Amino acid sequence: MNTILIADPEPVCRQQIRQHIGGRPGFRVVGECGSPYETIRYVNALEPDVLFLDVQLGGERAFDLIQQADHLPKIIFTARNESHALRAFDHQALDYLLKPYGAARLDAALQKVVSRPPADRLPDHTFASYPYPKNLFVEDGGRLRRIAVNDVRYFKAAGDYTVVFTEQGEFLSSSGIGSIERKLDPALFVRVHRSFIVNIERIDACYRDIGKLYLVMENGQEISVGKHYMNPIKSLIL
């Protein structure tokens, strides 16, 4: 079942999408919102598989809106004209729908939902044969500082950058979190969220709350596990 959140300032447009989806098996609308604040809150709380997002929601902030969320759904942008189409696809849009919606066009967008894996699904890795590094170098002032991989507690995405949390402090890497993930030993580091990679040996505890799983790291940081990243953590629970 693909869950869908509709974010649009126009109630009539939200209703049209909801009514169309209501008659399609395999899809369920879990919520509607009409403001940027509601959208971020609902995306984080409901973790929908798909977000219908109007390009005018929040004005110029609409394209940056999803970057503020902890969960990354597939995004179908909606608009009154084609002027934002190129920018939408630069932001990994699954589709771009023009209002008013036609039934055939909505069906085509829903077909793309089922034919493409979720945006934040953990990929299948074919691991390289070379050994993973025991040390990494991070920028520290005007020089590169060596840190032991085992000293890293977790990595957190920060836009196009990544914050490295270690015993010695925090360091900012210019590499994206996906690039960093490919350098790490999967026996030690696990991607548990769109924005987090954790060192398994630095997890102090985990707990469930309102259907979500949270990790408690040694430094007290709590990290929610994305629903598409559950299996690696579940495999560690006896």
Image: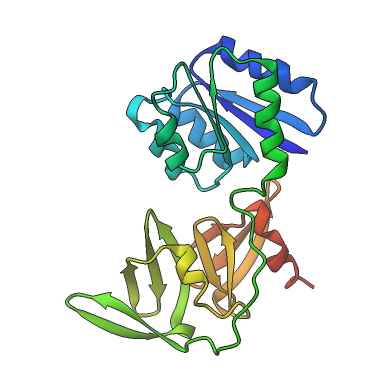
Residue at 41% over, 31% down: 62
Looking at the rendered structure, the number of numbered marks drawn on it comes to 0
Residue drawn at point x = 60 percent, y = 23 percent: 32
Is residue 70 placed above or below 154 in the rendered structure?
above
Residue 61: quarter of image: top left
Residue 71: x and y, percent? 55, 47
User: What coloring was used for the rendering?
Assistant: rainbow
29 sits to left or right of 35: right
As displayed, is residue 122 above or below residue 108?
below
Which residue: 47% across, 87% down? 133
Q: Residue at x 67, y 52 (%)?
A: 227
Quadrant of residue 125 within the rendered picture: bottom right
In the image as oriented, which residue stretches furthest toward the top? 12
Residue at the far left: name it: 142
List x then y, in percent, for residue 65. Answer: 42, 36
Q: Is residue 228 above or below residue 22?
A: below
Q: Is residue 96 or residue 201 the one in the foreground?
A: 96
Give the position of the C terminus as an image quadrant. bottom right
Q: Is residue 105 left or right of residue 202?
A: right
Q: Looking at the picture, how far across and down is residue 189, in whole percent?
A: 57, 75
User: Relative to the observer, which residue lies in front, 8 or 87?
Assistant: 87
Determine the residue located farthest toward the right in the rendered image.
25
- Image coords of residue 178 (percent x, y): 49, 64
Location of residue 1 (image quadrant): top right
